[in-house]
């Protein structure tokens, strides 16, 4: 077993998206080799309470390599709470969470924080394809 310190990953999403995406990634890969926590945000959530919970989870996840925060929608409550964590030097936020993004993060689990954040962003973008039929 590796003793290497890995980046922690915090998913902040509308309820229940984060858990569903993580469960799906686990089913595809067998497990996610990074420490991951999910913060689901109900539509009627208290933003201050949720922000405090995000800080608590990020603190628990950071073992020295930083925390990558993946949020589902920029400008939404989960995205705004994720951006509040940017006050910490060892936090990076990527918005637009999708399954390809999460799988890319899991597959590149040995990267450092900045490189992992870039892989997350490219994984999310590269996973979006327009599959046109004959009539397009």
Image: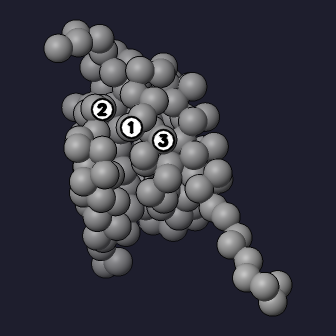
Rendered-image quadrant of the N terminus: top left
**Displayed quadrant of residue 48:** bottom left
Residue at x-position 37% and y-position 55%? 12
> Relative to residue 43, is residue 53 drawn left or right?
left
Residue 19, position in %: x, y? Answer: 26, 60
Q: CA distance from mark 3 to mark 2?
A: 12 Å
Q: Is residue 16 above or below residue 34?
A: below
Q: Do the numbered discs 2 and 1 sit on residues whose CB atoms are within 8 Å?
A: yes
Asked whether 77 or 4 is in front, the reply is: 4
Q: Is residue 88 visible?
A: no
Asked whether 16 or 46 is in front, the reply is: 16
Residue 5, position in %: x, y? Answer: 30, 15
Asked whether 93 or 134 is in front, the reply is: 134
Callout 1: SS: helix
**Displayed quadrant of residue 68:** top left
Observer-side mark, 3 or 2, equals: 3
On the image, numbered disc 2 is attached to which residue?
Answer: 34
Callout 3: SS: helix
Residue 75, position in %: x, y? Answer: 58, 64
On the image, numbered disc 1 is attached to which residue?
Answer: 106
Observer-side mark, 2 or 1, equals: 1
Q: Do the numbered discs 1 and 3 sit on residues whose CB atoms are within 8 Å?
A: yes
> Relative to residue 36, is residue 132 drawn left or right?
right
Q: Is residue 135 visible?
A: yes
Q: Residue 41, labelled with which disc?
A: none
Q: CA distance from mark 1 to mark 3?
A: 5 Å
On the image, numbered disc 3 is attached to which residue?
Answer: 104
| Label 2 crowd bin: few (<14), some (14–19), many (20+), radius 10 Å | some
């Amino acid at each position: 077993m590796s003793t290497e310190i890995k980046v922690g990953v915090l998913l902040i999403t509308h309820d229940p998206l984060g858990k569903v995406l993580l469960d799906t990634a686990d089913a595809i890969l067998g497990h996610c080799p990074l420490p991951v926590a999910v913060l689901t945000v109900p539509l009627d959530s208290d933003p201050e309470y949720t922000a405090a919970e995000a800080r608590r989870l990020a603190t628990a996840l950071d073992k020295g390599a930083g925390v990558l925060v993946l949020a589902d929608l920029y400008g939404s409550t989960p995205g705004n709470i994720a951006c509040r964590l940017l006050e910490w030097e060892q936090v990076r936020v990527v918005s637009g969470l999708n399954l390809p993004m999460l799988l890319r993060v899991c597959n590149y689990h040995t990267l450092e924080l900045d490189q992992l954040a870039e892989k997350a962003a490219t994984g999310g973008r590269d996973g979006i394809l327009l599959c046109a039929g004959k009539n397009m």
